[in-house]
Image: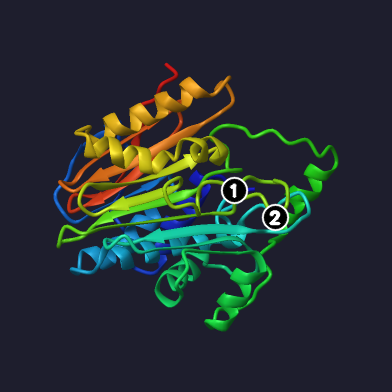
Amino acid sequence: MKSRRDFIKTAALGTVAAGILPKFSMAGNIPGGMSSKPLVISTWDHGLVANAEAWKVLSNGGRALDAVENGVMIVESDPSQTSVGRGGLPDRDGRVTLDACIMNEFGDCGSVACLEHIVNPISVARRVMEKTPHVMLVGDGALEFAIAQGFKKEKLLTENSEKAWREWLKESQYKPIINIENHDTIGMLAIDVNGNLSGSCTTSGLAFKMHGRVGDSPIIGAGLYVDNEIGAACATGLGETVIRQCGSFLVVELMRQGRTPEEACKEAVERIVKHEKDVKDLQVGFLAINKQGEYGSYAIHPGFNFALHNKEGNSLISSDHWQK
């Protein structure tokens, strides 16, 4: 099973072969700061290749919404990525179910949950936003809608993911492990040259979860929230804890009250720590951006990082954290 870092190496080699080498930097320890517009930020190492794709849209004057869709699609489509899209690890029944949501500068949003057989749930979520009067479609209804919209039905369970699942079946023990690829959502936030914000979030959820389990990632206000007057935020980690605090909405509201993105993320993490009985094995990270181009992050434990792409290039930054 490949780690996020293995995926970055493979993806970078692929871009070299294609003659397109993004400016990747793996060195970075500044958890928050200010950047010129446009810019895009996204969670974890896989955010580097996602950012590179999103930057193609932003650097050409494109819309933030298109950037955050195109960017995360790169990760969804890669079979080596075990926490998102095609390569996602299955639930305990061996079924790969995907969750995603997207939100634009007007407050429009779309979401799908427990979606099977579709490689790019983020694009289905956008169709829900643009083609239906609803915000969320789930399960068989989401699949029927996707097929009706022209999406191709495919087998998502890869050979490696099936092997991991069959190994898990030997003991069938379930315990999330922090900072491991069983719940590494990719969330992406962007601000374009016009100063407009959009965000996306997509995941295959917790590995070997109960069938039908849905985390925070496709829930507007939990895994993602965008307010074009204030800023945007997304979350990663154990979704149940984020849902209980309406985490991403909380971060945006704290920015509305005057906190910087990093301060808002920190306060949201501290609220989770306060309300949870034990956070020793519980990781949650928040990532945020405001209207002025300030960005920031904060997590419970060390290990969370995010990718930032602006005019200076594409770099990976380590997040500050509560557990010292």
The disc at residue 89 is none
Secondary structure beneath disc 1? loop
Mark 1 vs 2, N-terminal side: 1
Q: Position of residue 222 (x, y in %)?
A: 45, 45
Quarter of the image with the C terminus in it? top left
Residue assigned mark 1: 2
Q: Nearer the viewer, residue 193 or 161?
A: 193
Q: Are marks 1 and 2 in contact (CB under 8 Å)?
A: yes
Q: Position of residue 179 (x, y in %)?
A: 53, 35
Q: Give the farthest residue toward the front.
A: 133
Secondary structure beneath disc 2? helix
Mark 2 Cα shell of 10 Å, populated few (<14), some (14-19), many (≥20)? some
Q: Give the farthest residue toward the right.
A: 170
Would you say 89 lies left or right of 238 here? right
Q: Nearer the viewer, residue 72 or 142?
A: 142
**How many discs appear?**
2
Instruction: Report the Cα–Cα distance between label 1 and label 2.
Output: 9 Å
Q: Look at 52% across and 47% down and name the residue there.
A: 6
Q: Position of residue 99 (x, y in %)?
A: 55, 57
Q: Is residue 285 above or below residue 162?
A: above
Residue 198 can be seen, yes or no: yes
Mark 1 Cα shell of 10 Å, populated few (<14), some (14-19), many (≥20)? few
Amino acid on which the number 2 mark rests in the picture: Asn
Amino acid on which the number 1 mark rests in the picture: Lys
Would you say 44 lies left or right of 196 here? right
The disc at residue 160 is 2
Q: Is residue 8 above or below residue 172?
A: below
Q: Look at 69% across and 33% down and name the residue there.
A: 175
